[in-house]
Image: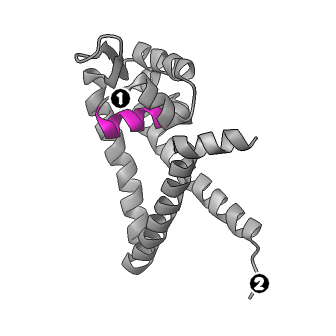
Amino acid sequence: MSVKTSVDMARFIFTTGKLIQDQVFKAHAVHFVSKGKAESYGELSMPQMHAIMIVRTRGQVSMRELAEGLGVSAPSASVMVDRLVERGVLSRRPSRSDRRKVVIRIAETALDDIVSCENKVLGIFVDLVEKIGPETAQQWCDVLKQVARALEGACEKNTNPARKGATDANQ
């Protein structure tokens, strides 16, 4: 049995994650090309897909919330939203509660396409779960719960204003 270092394990996790990501991208491209929607959806970048997923999950977001979710500046998020609005994927409207804010949503004309693609990608994961079996799939879920907790803790630590102030004061 070989001894694995933290770097070896991290590399394996990263590489396997990349394989999963590649499968999602391929399913995405094949799905929209087969539906004749390649012009609108076929060339989406990973950050654009991430933006769409954030908006889809939350229903609607402000530009600030989207920028924070993506880990980019508000102007960068705004440029990305502009491109996705031009493609008919997202809509951008003034907030009803605060006209100074902009609310980002999935464009009504794009919702069916996005749901259809999500179902296609979900099918890939269903097939994967069936191939690895229920016991392994449950172990994977258990591990991913631990990963999510660790990442949520890291995110809270990095975005805690009190901690940031303390860190800034020490520099």
Q: Does residue 27 lie above or below 136 as drawn? A: above
Which quarter of the rendered picture does the N terminus lie within? bottom right
Label 1 sits on a secondary structure element that is strand
Q: Position of residue 46 (x, y in %)?
A: 55, 36
- Nearer to us in this view, 96 or 43: 96
Q: Does residue 138 lie above or below 127 as drawn? A: below
Q: Position of residue 139 (x, y in %)?
A: 45, 76
Residue 60, located in which quarter of the rendered image?
top left
Residue at the bottom extreme of this rendering: 1
Q: Is residue 57 magenta?
A: yes
The residue that label 1 is drawn on is: 61
Label 2 sits on a secondary structure element that is loop
Disc 2/disc 1 C-alpha distance (Å): 47 Å
Amino acid carrying label 1: it is Val
Q: Position of residue 164 (x, y in %)?
A: 60, 42
- Nearer to us in this view, 149 or 145: 149
- Nearer to us in this view, 103 or 125: 103
Q: Residue at x 41, y 32 (%)?
A: 52
Q: Residue at x 55, y 31 (%)?
A: 45
The residue that label 2 is drawn on is: 2
Q: Is residue 131 magenta?
A: no
Amino acid carrying label 2: it is Ser
User: Magenta part of the protein: which range?
Assistant: 50-59
What secondary structure predominates along the stretch shown in magenta? helix
- Nearer to us in this view, 70 or 130: 70
Q: Does residue 3 lie above or below 105 as drawn? A: below
The crowd level at tag 2 (other Cα within 10 Å; few <14, some 14-19, many 20+) is few
Which quarter of the rendered picture does the C terminus lie within? top right
Does residue 49 appear in this view? no
Does residue 138 appear in this view? yes
